[in-house]
Image (cartoon, helix red, strand yellow):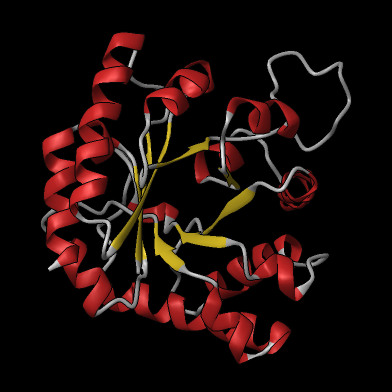
Amino acid sequence: MLYLIGNWKMAPEKGTQAADLVKKTNDMAKLYKKNITTIICPPSIFLASVVKTAKAPLLVGAQGVAGSVEVAQTGKISAGMLKDSGAQYVIVGHSEMRARGDSNTDVQEQITRLFEKKLIPIVCVGEKAHDAQGWYLSEVKEQLETAFGNLTPLQAKKMLIAYEPVWAIGAKAQRAATPLECREMTIFICKFLTDKYGEKVAKAIPVLYGGSADEFNAKSFVTEGGAQGFLVGRVSLDAKRFNSLAKSISA
């Protein structure tokens, strides 16, 4: 089973647009349910309404969570609020969140809060630069060590990991990442998990690709890159393209 997670980021602007997108994604999720688990993560302001509109097998997640239960955090959202809104998954450690200041320790605290409320973390890891000496592996290992540092094997098995090569994402991307570079990292992540928890637990944790995947290159990241799914941004906001991506990896 592959995972296809749509991170809507700060879009769409209107609730009517969000409702329409959910309905179209519902249809897609039903069409490919035998091979793909589809999850959408809308902005928090739409979360409750999206949960009401979403129909099985489509699942709903959130884009972030506060790492503390301290009430005096203007603009933050607690794990309890997300749980009450109907979310099942939550993205943590996204490269955009890390760029705004979230540290590895912040991510660890966020994961702790999510497990307290029985929510499933989608933890993002990835290097800022892909150097020839291989130091980027140390950067990802440090992120993994902190994220999984306090987790039991049972908790770890519930996690999803999304590998984000930061240097290959967005307008400032140096270049596109290749499926072989993705495979190197999926193997590296799997080895880390195997060393920490054993092979059985490691195999139970899906490693997704969180780079610039689309309907044209997604299949190669599965067959050649070892990705067990995708965390995608802008493509998930276009129902036709999102459907085409799902079709490409479902075949």
Q: Position of residue 60 (x, y in %)?
A: 46, 38
Q: Going by the picture, which residue comes out furthest to the front?
A: 56
Q: Is residue 42 left or right of residue 161?
A: left
Can you say whether 217 is above or below 179 in the image? above
In front of the other: 251 or 54: 54
Q: In which image quadrant can residue 149 be found?
A: bottom right
Q: Is residue 113 left or right of residue 82?
A: right
Q: Position of residue 203 (x, y in %)?
A: 52, 82
Residue at (67% x, 27% y) in the render: 84
What is the count of numbered marks? 0
Q: In which image quadrant can residue 185 be found?
A: bottom left
Residue at (43% x, 28% y) in the render: 42
Residue at (51% x, 15% y) in the render: 45
Can you say whether 34 is above or below 240 in the image? below
Q: Quadrant of the C terminus?
A: bottom left
Q: Quadrant of the N terminus?
A: bottom left
Q: Position of residue 150 (x, y in %)?
A: 83, 65
Residue at (22% x, 78% y) in the render: 223
In front of the other: 181 or 3: 3
Can you say whether 171 is above or below 122 in the image? above
Q: Is residue 139 left or right of residue 45?
A: right
